[in-house]
Image (tube, rainbow, N blue to C red):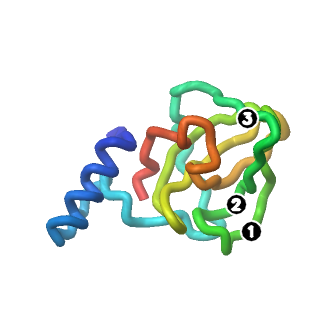
Amino acid sequence: MRVTRGVTLAVAALTASTGLVAGTAGTASASASCGRAAPADIDASGWPRMPAGVSANERSGSSTGCGVRGWADNQDELDYHCFTSGENGTWTYVRNNSDGSAGWVKDSLLPGYGSNLYCGF
């Protein structure tokens, strides 16, 4: 099942406002622990490029406490895999086509606010 950002965030908001615990794949409640890669699915929405002069660390999990695996910067072409929740918001797993590195990047740092495909965890 493919769950997109709008559905996932709507379910998470409903869960938070009602106090109900939802156990579906659509809830954005889990994060990617350090060392956890994304599933092989790739968000087919295109290959965005980082804006000129902007850079972001690619981390081994969805937290600044996880190690840096590489970086996305200055017009690098990125493949978005999927997003999950993490430290202070959502994070997208990206593969940098410019140098082959891959990791989790905070969505607020990415073009288009990252992937629209939920990872399922």
Name the residue beneath numbered marker 1.
Answer: 67
| Residue type, numbered disc 1 | Gly
Q: Give the numbered dot on residue 51.
A: 3
Name the residue carrying label 2: 59
Task: From the viewer's side, name the closer residue of 94 and 113.
Answer: 113
Q: Position of residue 16 (x, y in %)?
A: 24, 66
Could you classify mark 1 by the number of other residues whose Cα lies within 10 Å: few (under 14), some (14-19), or many (20 or more)? some
Precedes in sequence: disc 1 or disc 3: 3
| Secondary structure state at the residue bearing disc 2 | strand
What kind of element bears circle 1?
loop
Give the mark nearest the N terminus, 2 or 1.
2
Comparing 54 with 86, the one in front is 54
Locate the C terminus by quadrant. Answer: bottom left
Residue 97 shows which numbered tag? Answer: none
- In this rendering, the answer to whether 33 lies above or below 13 is below
Label 1 near label 2: C-beta < 8 Å? yes
